[in-house]
Image (cartoon, rainbow, N blue to C red):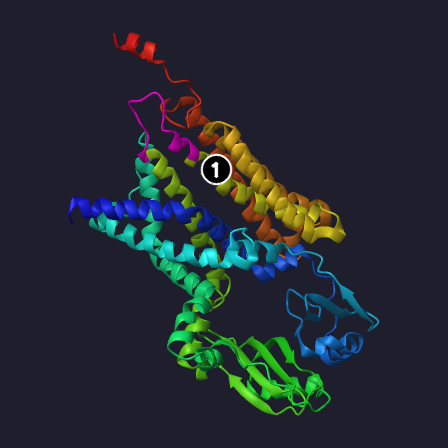
Amino acid sequence: MKSSTLRTFIAVHTWVGLVAGFCLFIAFYAGAVTLFHEELHAWETPLPQAAAPQRDPQLLIDAVLQANPKAKENFYVRMPSQFEPEMVLEFDERHFRLDAGGKLEEFRERSQLVDFVYRLHYTAGLPRSWGIYVLGVVCILYGLALASGVIIYAPTFFKDLFALRIGKNIKRMWQDAHNAIGMLSLPFHVMYAWSGAVLALGIILLAPFQYLIFDGKLLQLVGPDITAAAPPRAAGVAAPLAPALQLLAEVRRAAPGIDIETLVYHRAGDANAQMQAYGHMHQQTVADMGAVVLNASSGKLQRVVMPENFSAGTRFLRSLQALHFGSFGDLAVKWTYFVLGVGGAFLFYSGNLLWIEARRKRQKLVQPRSGKLMAQATLGICLGCVAGVSAVFLANKLAPAGQLPLWEERSYYALFFGCVLWAFVRPPARAAHELLTLCAVLTLAVPLAHWWHTGLNPLLALVQGDGVVTGVAIVAMLFAALYWKMARAALHRGRHGDPHSVWSLRQAPSAQEAIQQAA
């Protein structure tokens, strides 16, 4: 390859990586946490000692529709599960359940810890209305960075793949770590770049074909591949809902072995009322989500969507979703994705550090301002995300019980913007040590806050068979130790490393002193 061509690919890889890197760090770090969405839901809202008995869903449905007739248009019922024993009906962002005496009560979800961190994953903390589209564009840039990185690294692939040269050459060490992680996890990153762009921008990408080629009918054609069924049109004829238990029995006859998780109702009380039942089939396939559609008044079967009868479009979309969220396997797959997700976050962090090292002026006393600004931005945004996520976990256990969602969100943004501000008002070397220490302290405090709030320590939780509490504590302690070690390394480099660096705490000799030393 010509040197000019190689320089072009290096420039593309560098600048695309820098533009997309900050959002991708947040997306990967938050995404690694939300892989354990159900388990962490049990951590944020501890389960009762004895699970509530499963009631007939019809009791809850009738009570809600009687008190809120507007819910007939569209509502869904979340069935009890291992990590959420309560049956909950939701519509228009309102939540309802039956208390122990069978009386209807509206409640606000006690915590939104996992939902908030998941929102960080697909918006990077930007407003939800347009943040998801920004992440979609970032995923396209991400794919471009991957392609250019492979082209750059291909000539030395086998020679340097497992090399990690630790020594005085800091740039070489970071380069080795960056290249090894990037190439070893390349299939994972390609899948994420592709699936992220499709899931975030899919509808927008279809728009030109919808209006220019298919005369506005494309969405009708692909609709059966995207959803189990379109919402029905009202018949204008009143008809009562069939008993929910009867409908559930029909669902299980149509899809034997389905583990029903959600019931979606449309136009309840109309002759064309519809119920869509969704659940896992527990089959050895990447996409194992099944759906059964019934007329909710007559009980007539309308559609069965099973992995074995997926259309090509449905199989593609469901498989892509399963690959993106790691929902096609058990804990082994989730932990593998977790490690790869954290490794991905490191990839973007190390890429920024490499850019800074590449622009060091070893023969000049004053370093370029661009290097200092990039160092400050990298520390503020990346470590602000880390500290903010830990703060969300702490707020879940320490904030006032009735205002947890508000405090969880405020805690993240307060820590995030506070870290960004701190990074820009402190020298980079000081900020690196201080912010990494903050991350270590906040992360270590997570299991301690849970212990203080619940009285359940990790060892006792393990004895009682509560692997979630123990798992969160172990991961928090490991990450706290890692951040602490990184903080000590940053301080050591600042005190004893090359003074001609943005990471140095030592004063470089003045020009006059340098001339005198040379003489």
Q: Mark 1 points at which residue?
A: 379
Front position in the image: 416 or 456: 416
Q: What stretch is highlighted in magenta?
A: 358-373
Front position in the image: 262 or 116: 116
Judge left or right: residue 47 versus residue 3: right
Residue at x-position 41% and y-position 25% = 504
Q: Quadrant of residue 78?
A: bottom right
Q: Position of residue 360 (x, y in %)?
A: 33, 30
Q: Quadrant of residue 480?
A: top right
Say what amino acid the circle numbered 1 marks. Answer: Leu
Number of dots carrying numbers: 1
Q: Position of residue 474 (x, y in %)?
A: 56, 48
Q: Quadrant of the C terminus?
A: top left
Judge left or right: residue 16 versus residue 51: left
User: Is 482 one of the magenta-colored residues?
Assistant: no
Q: Position of residue 223 (x, y in %)?
A: 48, 79
Does the image show residue 440?
A: no
Above or below: residue 189 compared with residue 450: below
